[in-house]
Image (cartoon, rainbow, N blue to C red):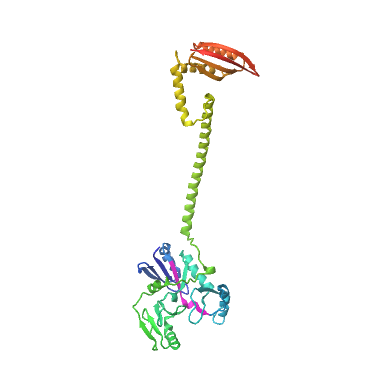
Amino acid sequence: MSETLYIRLGSKVENSIHWLVFSPEQQEIIASGELANANELTELTEKAQTRRVITLVPSCDIALKSLTVPGNSSRAIKLAAPYMLEDDLAQDVDELFFAYGNLAKNDQGHNCFIAAVDKQLLQQWQTWLEQADIFCQTMLPDVLALPISEQGCSAIALGEQVLVRLAAWQGQTFDANAWAIVSAQLQQQDDDLVINAYSPLPAQENNLAINEQPAELPMALLAQHANQQSFNLLQGEFQVKRNHSSALVNWLWVAGLAIFVVLLQFGIKGSQLWQLESQQAAVEQQIIDSYKSAFPTTKRVRVNTIKPIVRQKLNELQANADGEGFLTMLAKLKSAFTKVPELRPDTLKFDGKRKEIRIQAVGANYQSFERFKVELEKANLTVTQGSQSNQGDKVTGSFSIKG
């Protein structure tokens, strides 16, 4: 944000407002103009959205005072200073807001630099800007944006007023028709005073020395020197910390809602992924347990190696089996077990030399063993039934089967 919008407000809502967009880096005027009154500040809203804003306010509404306050504590000095000014201020101290400048102790021994302004007026200036949706964190008395002259003082005419800076913390803003009176007072205070004028000044009836400087656009001159000031009138209760314009708030609501939806989607997808991973882990464990049950001598096994190992063992079994082959016999066994569901195998072993399958089975009763034998013989298998015995409410027995 290299460009800055400078706005010079008036004392009243009906006063004209001068503005200028300036590029400090290029020392170039981007745009400038004048508004009829404070109600037209909305014309600057768009210009303020993408730029820093510095507001200048009339120094005729601000009392710039330099004091020598006893004490070393900054807090104690600030507490005492306003009451030292009671006799010099037209208003009650409680009605004023006091902002403090961070200046070094000067030759006169002053260690406290105060800008006193009516609280209601300061609030009014901020309200004008807020109503126009203009975010401004810096407000400066206009005379403090004039250059400091090593010899004499500096002055410029701005609209119907004249701005004069007398020192680092001293200046006046007054109506142009009062220039004759003010210039006479300045000459009385210092006969050798020289006014460095950056624009034509109103006529005067005294011999005050005027040193004409190259003419400057008033707001351009103020813009060039405003950045050199560290002072900000918006302190304490009037400090502006953040900008929440209506457009920004609306955008934040939309952005926040979008982020919430995205996070919600991530949450749902994450939950689904976690469930799938849990299911996959359970299935893989079942596969490993079944493999170890079939091959109890196996100590370590991985899921991705089970399939090729099982395929290899089946191929070996089929290669060593004759007749219809081992796999064909297994298919017939499966058919028999399907037809006699109350009988289930407990162990199954294949004797490659004898080409024989041996089954240890558990059944509901003796009849289930007989029915199973009949089904195998129907499938043209030779069956030798072994001994049977009761095991509680179950019956155990064995079969030797050949193709």
The answer to whether residue 92 is visible is no
241 w.r.t. 205: above or below: above
Q: Position of residue 14 (x, y in %)?
A: 46, 73
Of 297 and 33, which appears nearest the observer? 297
At a point 59% along the width and 18% down the height, the residue shown is 362
Residue 58 located within the stretch drawn in magenta:
yes
Of 368 and 172, which appears nearest the observer? 368
Magenta residues?
53-67
114 w.r.t. 374: above or below: below
Of 386 and 116, which appears nearest the observer? 386
Q: Position of residue 295 (x, y in %)?
A: 52, 24
User: To which quarter of the image does residue 37 belong?
Assistant: bottom left
31 w.r.t. 183: above or below: above
Describe residue 104's horizontal placement relative to residue 207 as left or right.
Answer: right
At a point 44% along the width and 75% down the height, the residue shown is 144
Describe residue 200's horizontal placement relative to residue 289 as left or right.
Answer: left
* Numbered-mark total: 0
49 w.r.t. 399: above or below: below
User: To which quarter of the image does residue 150 belong?
Assistant: bottom left
The answer to whether residue 99 is visible is yes
Residue 278 located within the stretch drawn in magenta:
no
Of 344 and 136, which appears nearest the observer? 344
Instruction: Check the image and name the residue furthest to the right.
Output: 392
Q: Position of residue 344 (x, y in %)?
A: 57, 19
At a point 52% along the width and 24% down the height, the residue shown is 294
Report the magenta stretch's main SS. Answer: strand
Q: Quadrant of the N terminus?
A: bottom left
Q: Position of residue 84 (x, y in %)?
A: 57, 80
At a point 44% along the width and 72% down the height, the residue shown is 229
